[in-house]
Image (cartoon, rainbow, N blue to C red):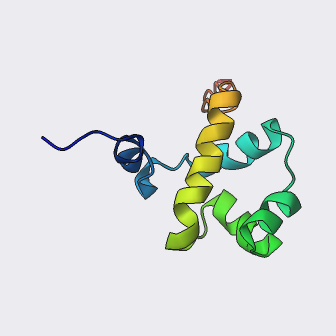
Amino acid sequence: MPELTEAAVDAPLMRPDLMPPPEIRARLRKADGLTQAEVAEVFGVTLAALNRWEVGAAKPRRRLLKTYIRLLNGCAQKHPQAAQAAAPSTPICG
């Protein structure tokens, strides 16, 4: 049996399909006090590119995807309330 390492355990957690949904991404960033400009600078992308990631219009390139997921997951661990999906609003019936 292969030895379990931290990297081996983290690998499945970094799958692209485990990225938080778009409606939560900006909330996580804001909960940690980060601006779009700060995050875009760290990743070396334009503000427009980061905005597209946050709204789900585009995904980061493969080399940045794992790191972006790591950032979002780290924010979610620090701010679990921001990681919660908003409760659907109750429709008002007349």
Whole-percent x and y of residue 46?
79, 76
Whole-percent x and y of residue 16?
44, 57
Task: Confirm whether residue 59 shows in the render.
Answer: no
Name the residue rendered at 87%, 53% in the picture: 35
Asked whether, in this view, residue 62 is left or right of residue 79, the answer is: left
Asked whether, in this view, residue 71 is left or right of residue 65, the answer is: right
Residue 33, relative to residue 66: is it above or below? above
Q: Residue furthest left?
A: 1
Name the residue rendered at 80%, 36% in the picture: 31
Whole-percent x and y of residue 8?
34, 46
Whole-percent x and y of residue 57?
61, 68
Quarter residue 47 falls in: bottom right
Residue 25, relative to residue 38: is it above or below? above
Asked whether, in this view, residue 49 is left or right of residue 6, the answer is: right
- Please name whichever residue, 54 or 80, is drawn nearer the observer in this view of the structure: 80
Residue 38, relative to residue 60: is it above or below? above
Name the residue rendered at 61%, 57% in the picture: 68
- Please name whichever residue, 27 or 4, is drawn nearer the observer in this view of the structure: 4
Q: Residue furthest front?
A: 3
Looking at the rendered structure, the number of numbered marks drawn on it comes to 0
